[in-house]
Amino acid sequence: MRFLNIVAIMLALFFTVTVSTSSAAPVPQAEANVTTIAVIITVIALLLAFFFLMGGVKYVTPENVLDTEIRKNLYEYIDEYPGSHLREIARELDLKPSNAAWHLRKLEQTNLVRSRAIGGKKVYYLVEGGIEAKQRAVAESILRNKNARDIMQYLSEHPGKHLLEIAHALTINHHVVKWHINKLHEAELVEGDTTNSAYPIYYPTEIGRQFMETYIEYLKTPVGKAA
């Protein structure tokens, strides 16, 4: 409030001087315009200074970033559900997406959280877990899609199938299967082999099997979050 009082006093002085000058003697129009512009710029600068210093803006560091309850909740949520995307996080924590995005940027800027674009959506995971946390986040993000889960489940039960066989068995368009296979391959959940065929045949990796088993168990829990 002290700063606000100072701003009010300075504004009063500026307008008093301006009015006194204009009433004391005739002032050329050009000079009056310059004075008016100077006063307006000064007012804007003072208001900006007020909002910056008094409006709750402060430098965020790794030490104080989790002092805010919203960011603490975001951090804990991502820790429990790595690979969640923005709208999902905002919905589960009852936040506006724009508000959640702002606080997530603060967590990224302080190197507590990272994000990666998967399937057109930005998903989040903790830095603390390293490569394992990133793999888990990417895997869970991909496996939220039913087609991706069906493909992984099919390959777990029928390893060594090529794209058209997978598409035929699951009655999914082969272009859709190819798109998901590429995502699964990028995430190191499946691998392709062209040793004995011109067309690659696919196998689930060990990591892929582990994540698939974990995710299936997760879907069986009473509170499911999968899309």
Image (spheres, grey):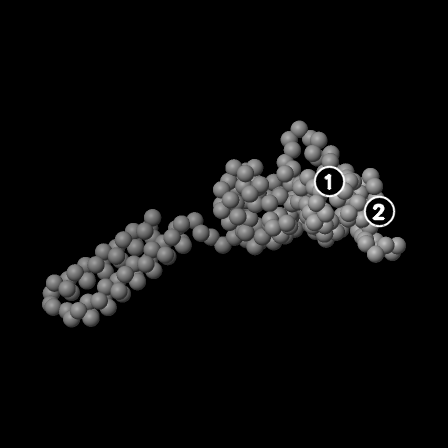
Q: Does the image show residue 129?
A: no
Write down the quadrant of residue 25 in the picture: bottom left
Write the residue at 17% across / 69% down. Answer: 29
Image quarter of the C terminus: top right
Write the residue at 83% across / 41% down. Answer: 158
Say which label, 2 or 1, has the lower sequence index.
2
Write the residue at 29% across / 51% down. Answer: 5
Mark 2 = which residue?
Answer: 160
- Residue 10 percent location from the top left of the image: 26, 58
Mark 1 = which residue?
Answer: 171
Residue 60 appears left or right of 20: right
Residue 10 appears left or right of 49: left
- Residue 88 percent location from the top left of the image: 58, 41
Looking at the picture, tell me which residue is in the foreground, 95 or 13: 95
Q: Residues within 10 Å of mark 2 (few under 14, many from 20)?
A: some
Q: Tell me the element at label 2.
A: loop
Looking at the picture, tell me which residue is in the foreground, 34 or 147: 147
